[in-house]
Amino acid sequence: MSKILVVEDEAFLLQALSDKLKKAGHNVETAVDGVQGMEKIKSFKPELVFLDLLMPNKDGYAVLEEAKSMDETKDIPIVILSNFGDEKEIKKAKDLGARDYYVKANLKLSELVTKIEDYVKK
């Protein structure tokens, strides 16, 4: 069982992904904006973070940058889930330290759940 944080402001996607991960046996926490997401990264110490880019209060890029700049959180794999599919956005996120990048429109939650083992160190 892995500790996973989902940071997403779209309620439907947040609930669907959280439910799918819990059914797969993971310990899941959620956050609805970047400020809350960063607080939970520090307090919950997840083994994996799914992070949206466009959110209120603090965007995903700022969360990614902050998490990767701190010793206690820099090694946590962060996977971007975004509506932005443009190569420039993908490159920016990966340059900031994102492990992977998925465009929400092309996302199958079941595929994401099966890839978790690739992201989490056992």
Image (cartoon, rainbow, N blue to C red):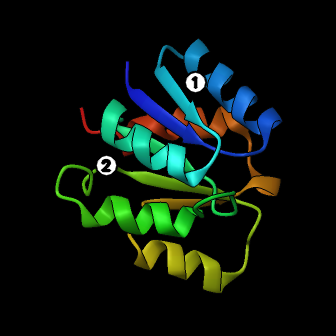
Rendered residue at 39%/27% (across/down): 3
> In the figure, is residue 26 to the left or right of 20?
left
Q: Nearer the viewer, residue 38 or 68?
A: 38
Where 41 sits versus 17, above or below?
A: below
Rendered residue at 46%/73% (across/down): 94
Image location of residue 22, percent across then percent down:
57, 16
Where 116 sits versus 81, above or below?
A: above
Quadrant where the image shows the N terminus:
top left
Image location of residue 46, percent across then percent down:
36, 35
Q: Which mark is residue 21?
A: 1
Q: Nearer the viewer, residue 99 or 115?
A: 99
Mark found first going from the N terminus, 1 or 2: 1
Using the numbered discs, state the Cα–Cα distance from disc 1 to disc 2 in whole angstroms.
18 Å
Element marked by disc 1 = helix
Residue 98 shows in this picture: no
Image location of residue 45, percent across then percent down:
31, 35
Going by the numbered disc 1, the residue's amino acid type is Leu
Rendered residue at 47%/60% (across/down): 63
Q: Are marks 1 and 2 in contact (CB under 8 Å)?
A: no
Name which quarter of the figure residue 6 lies in. top right
Q: Which residue is mark 2?
A: 76
Name which quarter of the figure residue 43 lies in. top left
Rendered residue at 64%/39% (across/down): 111
